[in-house]
Image (spheres, rainbow, N blue to C red):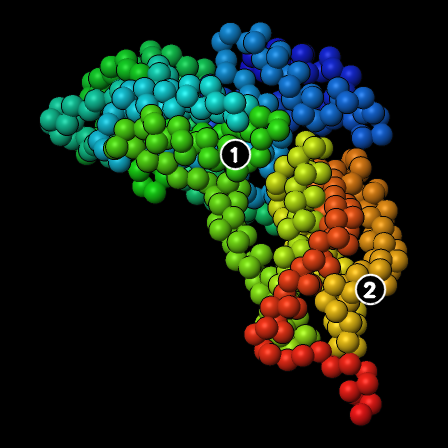
Amino acid sequence: QETLMKADSIIGAMPVVEGRMMVAGRSLINGVSGGSYGMGVFKLQDFEKRTDPSQSVDAVVGQLFGMASQFKDAQVLFFTPPSVQGFGSADGFEFNLQSKADDNWQDMYKVVGEMAMALNQRPEIQYAMTNFNPNFPQYQMDINVERAKDAGVSVSSIINTMQGYFGGLYTTDFNRFGKQYRVMIQAEPSDRDKMASIDKVTVKNQAGNMVAINQFIDFKPIYGPESVSRFNLLKSAKFSGKANPGYSSGDAIKAIEEVAAQHLPKSYSYEYSGMTREEIAAGSQQAVIFLLSLVFVYFLLSAQYESYVLPFAVLLSLPVGIAGAILFVKLTGLENNIYFQVALIMLIGLLAKNAILIVEYALQRRHHGLSLFEAAIDGARARLRPILMTSFAFILGLVPLAFASGVGAVGNRSIGMGAVGGMLIGTVFGVFVIPVLFVIFQALQEKISGKKPVTETQDQA
């Protein structure tokens, strides 16, 4: 509570913070309760009031991490909520370190510490931490079973009594005011805050007499984890972290895999969870989606041109625009995220449209008897004006999206900047690349099919 109040005073002194709430006894990262945990939630001012770049979410989180050095008696972490609710508790990556052997908690703690240290030394990782700690002071309760049996006291009675007095026990329900309430029993805090409190606890034996419980139990001070976490039924320690600015979540995942391969013993493994698990599952579908998009465009063009070769003049012009999209995103400091990938799918259709305009007109000129070179030049010249009009109208329409601010700004900028860059580069260079591709693949088509172009005179005859 004292640590939370200290953090509350620091956060409350920041003008950018509009409201805040502190809760003692609860961890937001791993969802456990305990006297050694605490959490806080605070809200920043509206975007209209935070015009200074130093008041952005990432900047504020960076300032708070700098203030965290003042806490010597606690491990303090600041993070933003996950991008999709329900997938994890924090924005960034999540994974679970698992022990497949019968290691004790202290041995596992050494491996966890080495993993955390190695991750935090990677340039891709801003921070990587875990709440796993087996060094909480505890008491181990040993029951003298023989003495309890001689006194007519069952082991289950001893355990239930200790649970009811010190841990709390759910007993029953009752209805009132149209609602159902749970009944919990537990001793008052003043009656369970010292070891001497056990001397006042009694348990009923088989004869119905109340006997002191301290004659059947012994306590030994030990150290251990306050809460035990398991993943895939294995002992586990949950890691949470975030990538450094300029690195994507994919870079962070790759760094985790490299560090795990170098530092994890053979008896240990790791599994991703939360949004990271979904990202990896969806990442394997990315190549399939792009391939299906290209296959769809290819067969559509094959039917239009009645050729399996000429559509490559359209498809091979797409990498020019895609390279432009990647260049613009990198230059503006954005990442290869799901929004940018959506923009790439959209670019396949938009860039193919420009190529289709040129190739279709050039093919008509070729059928009218022009040479391959003349048909290509004529097609590019005739379609230049409509291509520039439609492409630059689209580009100018996306400029506000490319420079968006406020809620969802990163996603909007990723789509806008990727589409703007792809269309701009694809349009400027495409008018030079597409005619060359037409000459190459139309000549190849005529060589394979053996068909000569039909002139207008032959058509009339």
- What residue type is disc 2 on? Asp
Quarter location, residue 204: top left
Q: Residue at x 50, y 16 (%)?
A: 75
Quarter location, residue 312: bottom right
Quarter location, residue 56: top right
Report how far apart the C-alphas of labels 1 and 2 lie in the structure. Answer: 46 Å
Identify the residue at the far bottom of this view: 461
Q: Which structural element holds mark 1?
A: helix
- What residue type is disc 1 on? Asp
Q: Residue at x 67, y 12 (%)?
A: 10
Q: Position of residue 251 (x, y in %)?
A: 52, 34
Counting residues from the start of the chain, the first of labels 1 and 2 encountered is 1
Mark 1 is surrounded, within 10 Å at the Cα level, by few (under 14), some (14 to 19) or many (20 or more) other residues, namely some
Quarter holding the N terminus is top right
Q: Residue at x 69, y 44 (%)?
A: 325
Q: Residue at x 55, y 47 (%)?
A: 180
Can residue 295 be seen from the camera position used here? Answer: yes
Q: Which residue is mark 2?
A: 378
Q: Which residue is mark 1?
A: 251
Q: In this rendering, would 194 be left or right of 312?
A: left
Instruction: Identify whether 383 is placed above or below 418.
Output: below
Instruction: Identify whether 40 is placed above or below 389.
Output: above
Quarter holding the C terminus is bottom right
Give the total number of marks visible in the rendering.
2
Whether the residues at callouts 1 and 2 have beta carbons within 8 Å, the answer is no
Mark 2 is surrounded, within 10 Å at the Cα level, by few (under 14), some (14 to 19) or many (20 or more) other residues, namely some
Q: Position of residue 307 (x, y in %)?
A: 62, 74
Q: Position of residue 65 (x, y in %)?
A: 60, 16
Q: In this rendering, would 67 be left or right of 133?
A: right
Q: Position of residue 2 (x, y in %)?
A: 56, 11
Q: In this rendering, would 62 be left or right of 366?
A: left
